[in-house]
Image (tube, helix red, strand yellow):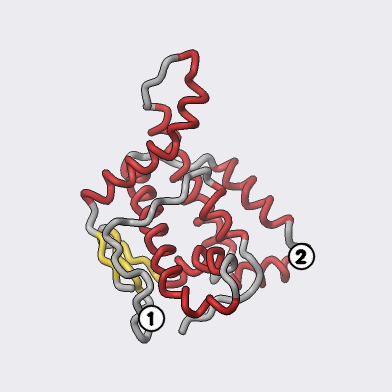
Amino acid sequence: MISIRGPVTALGLLLAACSGVPAPSPSPANTDLGRPLPSPVPEIVARVNGQPVRIGQILPIAKTQLDRVSAADRDRRMPEVLRRALDQYVDRELLLQEALARGIQADSRQVDWAYDQMRREHADDKSWDEHLAELGMDPQSFRAELRAQHTVAALVEQEVGAFPVPDAAQSAVREGQRKAVHDALVGRLRGKARIELLL
């Protein structure tokens, strides 16, 4: 059984909230999310258009969700939580692939600012390195994840900006349509993607 321990990670919260992208709805293709996990749990838990997704990439998301579950229910809920985290990560990967295909890039200044904000929460290099090790990352991979999140956010902003609305109500209507636009884009991308789930 996989164990997920330690303090709430900044990356898990980042995956869900930093980019301002709404969390995805569960995929209708998912059937029994609570069925037992394969034993052993594979290193590669999915492929998205041929791109592997590793168990370590979904653990921060799963840990954030498991922290909301009572300790007594964690083992029982682990398969469902991991599969939901995988579903969320697959959506994120589809959006990232689409953004890169369109030539959309994250604003490097925003990525650097977000990195610096996270880094300030740790007093010294040793504390920072330990925190990143808990996430299964190093400074470069952490920065790469931040860049991915900001790239996805830029894609969603482009989609929201293309949504036709009257000038007078533009800002409020666009903000209100963000989740609908996000979900419609994910639905289109899932419809043409090759997704292989191995978990």
Q: Nearer the viewer, mark 1 or mark 2?
A: 1
Q: Nearer the viewer, residue 146 or 198?
A: 198
* Circles 1 and 2 in contact, beta carbons < 8 Å: no
Mark 2: give few (<14), some (14-19) or many (20+) Cα within 10 Å.
few
Is 149 drawn above or below residue 166 in the view shown?
below
Which percent across, then down, holds residue 183? 36, 43
Q: Is residue 110 left or right of residue 36?
A: right
Task: Label 2: state its secondary structure.
Answer: loop
Q: Secondary structure at mark 1?
A: loop
Residue 119 in percent (x, y) is at 69, 57
Residue holding disc 1: 41
Q: Is residue 195 left or right of residue 41?
A: left
Mark closest to the chain's N terminus, 1 or 2: 1
Amino acid type, residue under disc 2 in the picture? Asp
Residue 54 occupies which quadrant of the picture? bottom left
Residue at 78 percent of width and 63 percent of height? 123
Q: Determine the residue positioned at 62% across, 59% down.
A: 10
Identify whether 77 is placed above or below 153.
below
Foreground residue among 34 and 183 = 34
Q: Position of residue 8 (x, y in %)?
A: 63, 65
Depth check: give the residue in front, 37 or 197.
Answer: 37
Residue at the spot 44% in from the left edge and 36% down from the top edge: 178
Is 71 on the left or on the right of 190, as rendered?
A: right
Residue 99 visible from this viewpoint: yes
Residue 137 in sight in this render: no
Q: Position of residue 115 (x, y in %)?
A: 63, 52
Q: Which residue is mark 2?
A: 124
Kindly indicate the quadrant of the structure image that contains residue 49: bottom left
